[in-house]
Structure formats: structure tokens, C-alpha cells
Amino acid sequence: MSYQYNSIETPLESSGHHDNGNELRPGRPRMCSRQCLILAVSALAGIFLLLDWSLLRFGGAKPIQRDVIKMPAGVNFGSWLSLEDYFFAGHGAVEVATPDDKNVAACLPPLHTGQGPRWQSETDLLANLTKQDGLAVALKVFHAHRVSFIDCEEDLAALAALGVKHVRVPMSWCLTDHDPSTIDSLKHTNTSEKSLAEKFTCADPFFEGVMWPAIPKELVTGFLRSCASHGITASLDIHTYPGATSIGTFSGLWPRWPRFWTHGDLPDQPKTDIGRGLLRDFISWMESLQETDPEAFEGLLAISPMNEPAHLAGLFGPGGVMPDKKSFLPDLPTQMAQDFLTDLNKFSDDSHTSIPDGPHLRVLLWLRDAVHAFRHSSLPAYGKELHVNVHESIFRPNVLPQNDSSDPGGRHPGATRILASWWRGITTADERSSWAVLDMHHYHAWEASCQGASDGPPEGNYTCGDNLGRRDALERCSSWAKIYRDAVDSECGTGAKLASAEFSASTHHRVRHACNDLGTLRASYDAQIEVAEKSNVELFWWSYKMPYGGAFRPAWSFKHFMYLLGVTSHPDETAYDCGEHLALSNEPNDDTFFPHR
């Protein structure tokens, strides 16, 4: 990948006199004035065309220099090893958080380009492809995507050249030691399909008949080796678990209602608890790389034990916004909850925040156990980190300070103080300054007081193009990083490592209302980067690329955003269709891969 850091040069260069066969010589007729005029006009047209292109490309200014654009600490490789539907919406891009009764994903290139089933989650896609084409074909579709979506050479080299140090890789819990490239989709029977399922899928223990497509372990270790060779380190984020830990497209099971917490969380039986067991196994696998694959181990930055656990659980049940809707996050047993609270609040006084009772304790206890498992591994001794992600939406509003939901910057100061107090209770100062990293995601796109909209209020706090309104909103909302840092410093003392492993420049989750003018996107990005840097909070952009994401790309694709800013030379686009092309009955198809179509 090449980068445009220098001024654009036009092909109009002064040169010495050259004999091109058209200079005037005795005996050769002189070119007529009309021909000269035509050539002059053509040359001027070419000049103005190039100048006009330059003005459009760079907004009438010099190309943006790389050292003027500050880079985030990292980027996410979203929808590579854990799928989210809106990355594959194509021209149907509307809403990041797809409602449970809608189908937006139209493809999974390169093998599924829109002629097959639409889908809501990766388990849904696997089931639909299997029903239509058989399991062997379905597994091939997933494998083709996984080996082609991220270029472990070019993409990592491009990020390293920009100065991005880390990548976060959201991934499924389902892993395999087998190689999917050995699957022959033309030679399979009912018997071999059973064998394929055993090797390349995982049965969800909480949903009968639901299968997950397994990620080859070698794909992950090969990626870590590539990271090491480019001077980049990776945080491996266990983005999904069986049963689904949250509602939403990222759960892997959407639109099914989560069962992880209701059917599988057994804090009093840690040895038989499925989620805790999966995390222990993952930690052991990472530990083993130190001896079996030192180069891959070098490329490992951190493990993130769970992504946004029980996200939005606070909306449901007594004290929530929807009190009549049964929550997917039940209370802990009474005595267990009281014992946990006593332990957490033993240091609370007038200067520290007390942890309230409620179903959120189930999540906080699970994450405490995750910290414990990592603490007793060999990984901290080798400088590896644990990035513990938690979201304020686990709290029901009735346990938060009165002004928390009405904060003018959507910064949730009360919830943040509670989480910081919890963090103090489960980690030590030495751990917080070395390997235990607190991670809180934050998007302006979902905060009403921060949103900018093309149609203005009430869809947004300000109207796209209203520079004063935008400035005021960004000053308020970007100060979230300072609120975050101040809360942790107040509760835990100084020196704690903090991250926000998901943010973007988007001003609204509904893309047709969002501001997509470059001025607003640049202002949103710069404001968040600046305050986070001053507050010593590491930011990871969501997400690196989404070539099939249509209108989502300007504000959500880092690759496309950098292109729009003039930092890089290639847009985030692809030659593959994503459901846009309607095939006719007599068109050729891939009859080698889909022999029965």
C-alpha cells in the first residue's frame, strides 16, 4: 500500500528543448493556428481537470500530512473471526443494531456474494447454508472468508506504517485443531457430514441443534506470527460464548434470547461451569505458545475474556426501562451476592463509592473469576495483559445516581464510579499498573446528547453542518475519557492502565441520519483522540475494514476513513457483489463449487 503524504504534482513540468519530430524546420509546413488553438485549449482543460480533482480530493488544501493525523493505539479486526451482520449489508446499510425481526446481511464473500441466504448471525448463516448446500459447502464459505478478509501481510504492514501498534481480534469461542482446507465439498455423504460436524463445528450446549463454525487454531497462531513480524501485537477478544452473553447481532446467536447467564453460569461450581472452563482452556492455549510457538507468543498483547458481558441487561426487569420484560441476567443467590458485596465494599468510605446490589453482580463476579484465572497463569510474568471489558448498561437505572442518565455529555459518571470501585476491589495497584487493563467501550452514535443528524433534532443533538452545535457537543461528549480517568484515579489511585477498545467517528447509529461529511467525521475523531491521549486512555477504532458495509464505511471503517482524509491511497472497497446483482436464470454460476445450482 502506498501513502499520499506529499503534494500532488501535475504533469506540467518545465523541460529543455526536445526534438519530438514536430519542431519547425526548413521545408516543413507550419502548423495552422486552429490546430495550435485546439492543442492549447486541450492542455488547459487537462490542467483544470487535474486541479479540480486535487481540490475535490483534498478539500482545496494541501494533502493531510500523516504527522497531523494522530493515530489510535489500535484498531479492531471486526467481522473476521466473529461475524456481525451490518458489515455485510451492502447497499442495504441502515442501522448498526439490527432489530430482531429484520435480515440485513446479504453475503459472505468471496463464495457467498448474495445469491444464497440472508442472515442475522453466524450460527444462523451456517444453518441456512447447510440447509441449502450441505455442511461441506457451508464450512468452505466460512473458511474462504476467514483466509481472505484480512491480508496478514498488506493490512498489517499498512497499519504499522501508520504507527498503529495493536490490533484487537474479536473471535468466537469455537476452535478446532483441524484444517478446513482439506474439506472436499464435492465428495461428501451423510456419514462424512457427521465427521465434518465433529471436526469443524461446535454444538451449542444451550440451544438444541445450533452449531457454530469452528476457527482453526493454526489460523490464529499464523496471524500472531504475522503480527510479530510487523512489530504489532494483538489482543484476542473472546467475543462470543455458547448461549449468547448479550442481546444483539454480535452475540453470534441473534435473534435468540441469551441463555448464557440463565442456563450456564454456575459460579458455585467453577469446575463444571462451561464459560469459565472455556476461558481457562483459552488461557492454557496461550500459555503453551511460549514453548510451542515463540514467534506467535511474541505477537500476543492480551486476552479479553468477554466482550460487553450482558450488554443492555439493565433495561429489563424491575427497576429497568422495560420492567415487565424478563431479564436474561438473573440475580445471584442471596448469600453469594451478600458475601461478594461485603468483600467489594470493605474499603468503601466517604471518599469511595459503594457497589449496589442487583443482577449486575453476576457479571462482576464472572469477571472477577476471569482476573483470578489469568493471575494464576504464567502470562503476567511474560508481560501479557488481560483487557477486562465491562459496560455500564448492565446496571438498572434505579441503582444509579439520579443524574446519571441525564448527564449532558452522555458520560455515565455514576456508573463509571461504581465500576471503578469494583475494579479496585478485585485487583491490586501493581496489577492495575502492569497487566490488568480496564476496558470500557464508548460511542457517540448511541448517546442522544452527542448525536449529530442530517435532519437535526430530535434525531440528533445538532444538525450536520451546524459547526457551533457540533463543537459544543464534541466538547461535552469527548470529555468522557477524562471522566473515565478521573473516576478510576479517584477510586483506585493513579497509575491504572485504561482502554476503550471500541470507538468510532460516527455521529448516529442509523446511517441515513448520521453526519457523513468529512468535516464532522474529522472533528469527531480528533476530539476523541485528543482527550483520550491527555487522559492516558488507549483507544481502539471499530473497525479496521468493512468493504461490504456500504454507507457505514465513512464513519466506521478505519481504512476508508484514512482514505477520505487523504492519508492512504486506497478506499475500502471490493470487486465482489453483496447482494446487489440479481442473477438471471441463464447466467453462469460456480458449478464447480455449487454443482446442483
Image: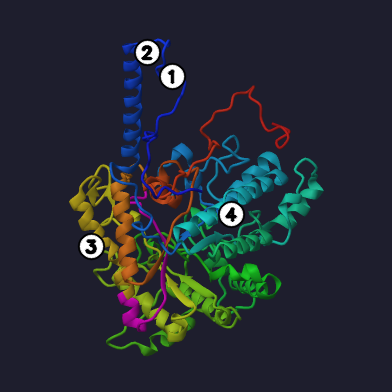
The residues tagged by marks 4 and 1 sit, at their Cα atoms, a distance apart of 49 Å
Q: Amino acid at mark 2?
A: Met
Q: In the figure, 49 relative to 178: above or below?
A: above
- Viewed as shown, does residue 416 lie left or right of 202? left
The residue singled out by tag 2 in the image is: 31
Q: Which residue is mark 1?
A: 22
Q: Does 504 appear in magenta?
A: yes
Q: Is residue 76 above or below residue 379?
A: above
547, above or below 349, in the image: above
Which-is-in-front pick, marks 2 and 3? 2
User: Residue visible at 43% across and 28% down?
Assistant: 18
Q: Position of residue 381 (x, y in %)?
A: 57, 82
Between residue 234 and residue 425, name the one nearer to us: 234
Q: Are marks 2 and 3 in contact (CB under 8 Å)?
A: no
Amino acid identity at mark 1: Asn
Answer with mark 2 or mark 3, whichever residue precedes in sequence. Answer: 2
Name the secondary structure under disc 4: loop
Comes first in the chain, label 2 or label 4:
2
Q: Which residue is mark 4?
A: 153
Residue 87: where, in percent of width, then height? 49, 47
For discs 3 and 4, the disc positioned in front in the rendered view? 4
Which residue carries the number 3 mark?
408
Q: What is the spatial separation of the Cα atoms under label 1 and label 3, in whole angstroms?
A: 72 Å
Disc ID at residue 313: none
* First reached walking from the N terminus: tag 4 or tag 1: 1
Disc 4 residue type (three-letter): Glu
Look at the numbered discs 1 and 2 and tell me whether their residues touch, using CB distance below 8 Å: yes
Closest to the camera, between mark 4 and mark 1, is 1
Q: Which residues are magenta?
A: 486-509
